[in-house]
Image (cartoon, rainbow, N blue to C red):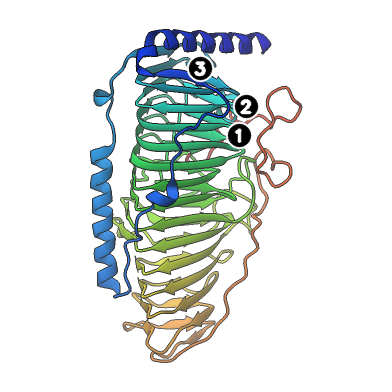
Amino acid sequence: MKAKEYRRKLAAISITMGLIVSLAGCGSSSKTDDTATTAVSDTETKIATEGSTDSGESSSESTSQSSSESTSESSKSSAPSADNITINETVSNSSDGEHAITADGESLSYNNIKVEKTGEADGDEADFYGENAAIFATNGGTLTLSEIVVDTNGKHANGVFSYGEGTTVNISDSVITTSGNCSGGLMTTGGGTMNATNLTISTSGNSSAAIRSDRGGGTVTVTGGSYTTSGKGSPAIYSTADITVNDAELTSTSSQGVVVEGKNSVTLNNVTLTADNKSKNSDKSSWYQAVMIYQSMSGDAAEGKASFTMKGGSLTNANGDIFFVNNTVADINLSGTSIVNNDSSGVFLRAAAAGWGNEGSNGGKVNLTADSQTINGDMIVDEISGLNLYLTNGSTFTGAINSDGTAGDVYVELSGGSTWTLTGDSYISGLTCDASSINLNGHTLYINGTAYTEGSSSTGEAITFTSSSSGGEGHGGQPGDGNEPPGKPGDGNEPPAKPDGDGEPPAKPGE
């Protein structure tokens, strides 16, 4: 291991020195001191308006669609291509487990280079600790990358990897392409930080999210650009971290668009999200969906409340359901987003048990808040799941809840002129509304078995969910709250090996 580490560092030093000599005239590579200032994405100033108004459904839809269309066009026009990036130097590495560029406790900057990585790695050392990544930052290092092209072709060959607390990668105006399995575009673990602006990322391997994280999580901020995946189990975003994406285009052509695992979050601001989930990375669930929120119990994500927030922009689903929540408590917050499900057999929300967690206690517990939001589609909550549905600020819901009969507890609260138009008989356990909120549309709404009278007000109580998910299979939870960086190999605190002997990650819906 020490010899391997020595060779890796020696290779990194050689590459860095070569770049300094060959690119000195254009500022393409420079080692900076500890007080150097690096370009960091400022998310607060780049978040656009939410695309909603107080004037009701038609205004909200119009604003949302206009916002999403302009965001989409902006993302497409500004996202870079490899052809329009000037390359002054190519850095290559073909050795298994090694890197083309490494910042190990250092501050380094590169621009106008091409990075090529082949070679392979297996399992935890690659997924958790960055082995075999093309570009790797660790031990509090800082990498600033601009106008670069990264191509990887190998198993577990992530494009750009940030590992460990205090480690930061800032990357802008660049193109990343990966073709091997388990090879994400951007990868963050162990509490690292990743700031990305205006990238074009394309992955084609299985379990290769464009924006990816694994054990120990971290903070990821992405602004602008285009992020596309085509492999099985490869959502545009797989989050075991806190991930925020602004003004970008996300497309998955085989997997979910977004997966959030455990006590982690994804926030999308004015993002165009398109998902066509048509292949499965696991036999634990029979449903397809655009957004999945769950707890796998693999030990890769802390147990606790998950979060998905989408403001403005658009979400278009080609197959199955819009949202699926399983084996966790989740907050879903929607505001002025255009949401279209092109699969007439799919539902808007499904909270249900699946193959993760302990049978009988592994349902989905959901707090869904809609603000100036249009919702079309049914909701299904099974007998071990629950839903608090809050419709606020002129939101509209057209659909049925548990139309096949009573199942899990469901509380619905309508305020601020919000309305619910039923498309089928519905069964809920609690309702708060004024007299004009509910349009039965010829159907019956049952509240704890009693038919609701149209034109009447109602007062009910929300459901209290505990934020700890159930136990289950997998290789155990992490110590403490589960968010500590994973132990490195050899320090006695490394996680257990993953169960798949060929180095693939465990069966998750996307990773």
Name the residue located 38 percent from the left edge and 43 percent from the top edge. 223
Residue 509 in view of the camera = no
Task: Find disc 3 in the rendering and name its residue.
Answer: 99
| In front of the other: 239 or 55 | 55
Which label's residue is closer to the chain start, 1 or 3? 3
Q: Are marks 1 and 3 in contact (CB under 8 Å)?
A: no
| Badge number at residue 156 | none
Judge the density around disc 2: few (<14), some (14-19), many (≥20) Cα neighbours within 10 Å. some
Q: Is residue 182 above or below residue 197?
A: above
Residue 261, given in percent of the width and then of the height, sits at 55, 47
Residue 130, given in percent of the width and then of the height, sits at 55, 25
The amino acid type found where label 3 is placed reads His
Task: Find disc 1 in the rendering and name its residue.
Answer: 166
The amino acid type found where label 1 is placed reads Gly
Q: Are marks 1 and 2 in contact (CB under 8 Å)?
A: yes
| In front of the other: 20 or 3 | 20
Element type where label 3 sits in the image:
loop
Residue 66, given in percent of the width and then of the height, sits at 23, 58
Task: Find disc 2 in the rendering and name its residue.
Answer: 139
Mark toward the viewer: 2 or 3: 2
Judge the density around disc 3: few (<14), some (14-19), many (≥20) Cα neighbours within 10 Å. many
